[in-house]
Amino acid sequence: MPKVSEKDSNIVDFIGLQEQSLIGGLINLKSELGFMVKLDELYQQLMRWHSIQKSDEMLVMGLFLDAHKSYYYAMLNFLRNGFSVSLMSARRAIEAGLTAYHLLIHPEDQPVFYDRNHSRYKEVFKRITGYMKDHLAEYPVAGGLIETYALTNKWALHATAEALSRQLEIQKPTEEELGRLLSHYSEVLDYPDPYLGHYYFLIYIFAMVHKIFWEGFFQPRFKIINPSYEKDLAEFKKLLNEKTGKHPLSAQ
């Protein structure tokens, strides 16, 4: 078995750095952690309250659970100084929300969702954001999510020149430079801003995804509206808008 060098920077060092970043992220957020926890509670309450009554609800509920899972991974990666990686989870949640939105309007397309070779699948589900953008009048709630989905491309989710900029600074690294190069694999943001701006941007994305499921799926199915949930949701949105106004997203 290959031996791990004690002096070289390698994947083991990077993993250790990630765990240190996680602790540092939790310390940085302090009282701001309440927003992350509250949105999780809003998701989880819906999971506890609603039981699947019809077979055609299973797919939408599965997409809801996938969005909630993506929320966990997005926040975990953000706390580990991996903002662009966290956006991959956010984009997946947006896709889940928009897919559910389409299926709620067109339940007849549920069988198509399982057939990747179907022409309708390629038209709708393979490019769900593009399809909804072309038919926005039919999906009025989707506009904000589609714009946000496009905005996330600015943070270099693909192998673009922007994404490679830090790595390309070093052509043939020495041992010291290699250590610095590996440290650049973590996306360290200045605190409080733009760190909090990026944090609340992620919360905002998942709040919009929650809105799709709440208004399109859960709320119409509740025989008795829970006043306290409606109140909590309205208060959360109000406070979140205040936070995103105070800590706007920056391009760092």
Image (cartoon, rainbow, N blue to C red):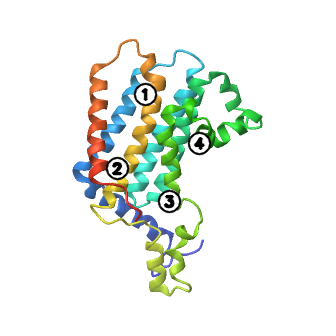
Q: Is residue 7 above or below residue 77?
A: below
Q: Amino acid at mark 3?
A: Lys
Residue 6 coordinates in the image, percent (x, y): 45, 79
Q: Is residue 57 above or below residue 120?
A: above
12 or 164: which is nearer to us? 164
The secondary structure type at the circle numbered 2 is helix
For label 2, count other residues whose C-alpha is less than 10 Å away and answer few (under 14), some (14-19) or many (20+): many
Write the residue at 56% across / 32% down: 137
The secondary structure type at the circle numbered 3 is helix
Write the residue at 30% across / 43% down: 241
Q: CA distance from mark 3 to mark 4?
A: 17 Å
Q: CA distance from mark 4 to mark 2?
A: 23 Å
Q: Is residue 125 above or below residue 147?
A: above
Q: Which mark is residue 214?
A: 1
Q: Is residue 86 visible?
A: yes
Q: Are marks 4 and 1 in contact (CB under 8 Å)?
A: no
Q: CA distance from mark 4 to mark 1?
A: 20 Å
Q: Amino acid at mark 2?
A: Tyr
Q: Which mark is residue 129?
A: 4
Q: Amino acid at mark 4?
A: Thr
Residue 7 coordinates in the image, percent (x, y): 45, 82
Q: Which residue is mark 2?
A: 200
Q: Is residue 55 left or right of residue 221?
A: right
Give whichever of discs 3 and 4 has the lower sequence position. 4
Q: Which residue is mark 3?
A: 154
Q: Amino acid at mark 1?
A: Trp
Q: CA distance from mark 1 to mark 2?
A: 20 Å
Give whichever of discs 4 and 2 has the lower sequence position. 4
The secondary structure type at the circle numbered 1 is helix
Q: Are marks 3 and 2 in contact (CB under 8 Å)?
A: no
Residue 157 coordinates in the image, percent (x, y): 54, 59
